[in-house]
Amino acid sequence: MDFSFLVERIRRLALEAGDKIMEIYESPDFEVKSKSDQSPVTEADEAADALISAGLRAAFPDVTLITEEQAASHALTAKTFLIVDPLDGTKEFVQRRGDFTVNIAYVEDGVPLRGVVYAPAKGRLFYTRADGVAVEEAGPFDKDTVGALREIGVSQPDNGALMVVASKSHRDAATDAYIGKYAVKDMTSAGSSLKFCLVATGEADLYPRLGRTMEWDTAAGDAVLRGAGGHVVRFDTHQPLAYGKAGWDNPFFIAFAPGVDLKAG
């Protein structure tokens, strides 16, 4: 894979999808439907999915493409694939809270090597450069010209005063009980894959997820966090979270900065 070309393409497609999403987000009204699992889907999800899928298929015709909106029709037959969540945080989108993201990742042998996470309503754009280092680009964003970049890196955590980020829409008693095992200085809530990016920038030290997620929910944020020096591991074994699993379901996981003293589940 030509990573320079890959990063240029996924950055552009994320920005283009973000424009389409914001056009719908800022409209007076938009349609919300329910998928078979009763999760919401909007015309913004579908429009962004169509735009990104067309762009990736044109640029990488020989690479398997998996997207949230089309996953039911896919059986994984390749160890290398592109995986997309065109609008992660649909509940935040519907409630106009702004914590939603566009996510595109490239996976090889179970590892998300490159990824982009774009939060258009927040004006934040994170991705891995061609060399794998995670960066945040300053806006306003031009599709043809990369703006000012800063390399991002995880914190040096103080286990006596940890910064924790947790899901805004999926908090439960099990998550709160697990967080309670740590000495927490402050805790914040965020939607979508932004939680990975907050750990990647050092704005948080720890993000536990004791709930159902799919690979497209996590791959891009995982790639950004890895590129910033962080880790994402299974909750049960503390082994690295792997991709390309049957059914696309993730186990519970923990995203964290090295130095956090992980507690047993």
Image: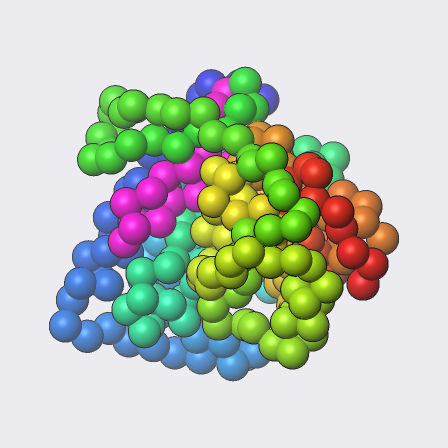
With 82 as the anchor, is 121 left or right in this view? left
* Residue under the image location 83 percent in, 58 percent down: 264
Q: Position of residue 249 (x, y in %)?
A: 69, 61
Q: Where, quadrant-wise, is the C terminus in this rendering?
A: bottom right
Please state the total of marks drawn on the protein image.
Answer: 0
Q: Determine the main secondary structure of the stretch shown in magenta.
A: strand
Colour mapping: rainbow
- Establish if 128 lies above or below 235: above
* Closer-to-camera residue (213/261): 261
In the image, residue 123 lies in the stretch drawn in magenta:
yes
Q: Left or right: where does residue 128 sit relative to residue 234? A: left
- Direction left: furthest residue: 28
Where does the image place residue 194, in percent across and percent down from the top left?
Answer: 46, 51
Going 55% across and 56% down the picture, which residue do you hit?
A: 185
Q: Position of residue 148 (x, y in %)?
A: 29, 23
Residue 221 visible in the current orientation: no
State the extent of the magenta-drawn residues as a range: 113-130
Quarter of the image holding residue 74? bottom right
